[in-house]
Image (cartoon, grey):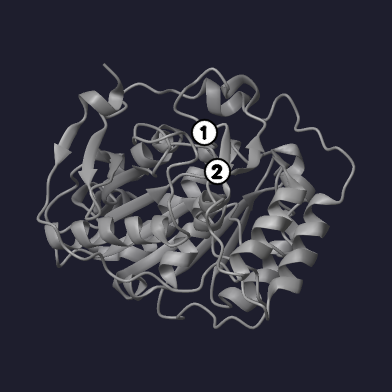
Amino acid sequence: MSAAGQARRHRLARRRSPPAARDETGLTWRTLLQYARAAKDFTATPSVSLPATSFDKLTAADRSGLPPAEMFELADAGQMAFRRYGPAGEGAALVLLIHGSGGHAGQLHGLARAIAGQGLGEVYALDLRGHGSSPGRRGHAVRHHDQLCADVCEFLHFMHRSRPAAPVVIGGHSAGGGLALRVLRSPAGRRLSGCFFLAPYLGLGSATIRPLFGGWVGVRAKRLRALALANVLGIRWFNGSTTVAFNLGPLGHDPAYAPSWSFNTMLAFGPGLWSATSPPIDPRIPVLSICGDRDECFFGDAYPDAFRILAPHAELASVECCGHWDILVDPGALTIVTGWLRRVLGDRAGPAARTARADH
């Protein structure tokens, strides 16, 4: 039986999920030219090869103690798997983690274990629709551009209902960071007590993006442009078509990974178009962003300029000798995240975290 079949199911009363931000695709007549220009800049490049060693640290990481997948019943009758780490105590924080493109919750095991193990909070790592242990065709289970944001907002509502007084922090890697940003900009973002990004995708057109994400993705450029125009015209019948394929390399044998994305999933899994005029993140919400100095997908030295627009109050950090997927397991990266959480949460962290702070 599959992991999804073995998962325990959480059945909640049907309810309307908290509203997600609207028009996040950025696909209107006003922005179509901007979208087309960004897509051209992104794809009009010679072939790029992802280094064969990009996944070495991730695949070699200790996966022992991986919690079983549990199944969350969504209000639209869909399902989303998650893995739970903790609990860290009644008064401790709640931390929600979102994986990146093509990935799954198991990639976040080292990070989740570090956070929960230090008593910083009870951690939930999601498998978004069509990824990991969640049902649906890999990378093609999303039906509309708001769906993933709505799913995450609904799960945040579930977390909040379980412990209404607990602070909630969201964290995301790569495209999962882009989705976390989208959630942060939605009404549900008002519930958050902090947000951290690991090498985040900040939207199509951002100067942080390497062409073709350094060889991680292959794009069907003509189809992408045609579907963008069709969506501006209100035609969405073909949004389930594949537009992006991932260079999974040694990860390709693992069925938990999504080898490609539909146009719907691509639109849903991020913050939309990059805009230098977007309102900044509320300065009352602490923000951390870290990136490896050898990131294959993004230009790490471009993040400071981006965050001066996005969140001028954000803390930024660079990790030495660290690539895009290394950051999920690199001890230095994990120390930066747990240290930031300890400062942000203060007395709201669990007893183990308070003991660790006293020892220092």
| Vertical arrangement, residue 108 with respect to residue 24, above or below | above
First-in-chain label (2 vs 1): 2
Question: Helix or strand or loop: what does disc 1 sit on?
Answer: loop
| Vertical arrangement, residue 350 with respect to residue 108, above or below | below
Q: Are marks 2 and 1 in contact (CB under 8 Å)?
A: yes
Question: Alpha carbon of mark 2 to alpha carbon of mark 1: how far?
Answer: 8 Å
- Amino acid of disc 2: Ser
Q: Position of residue 167 (x, y in %)?
A: 25, 65
Q: Which residue is painted at 11% across and 51% down in the image?
A: 12
Count residues near mark 2 (Cα–Cα under 10 Å), then give few for <14, some for 14-19, many for 20+. Answer: many
Count residues near mark 1 (Cα–Cα under 10 Å), then give few for <14, some for 14-19, many for 20+. Answer: many
For residue 354, side relative to residue 200 (left or right) = left
179 and 290: which is toward the camera: 179
Please say whether residue 149 is visible from this viewpoint.
yes
| Direction right: furthest residue | 46
What residue is pinned by disc 1?
258
Q: Which mark is residue 356?
A: none
Please say whether residue 203 is visible from this viewpoint.
no
* Numbered disc in front, either 2 or 1: 1
Q: Position of residue 331 (x, y in %)?
A: 52, 37
What residue is pinned by disc 2?
101
Question: Helix or strand or loop: what does disc 2 sit on?
Answer: loop
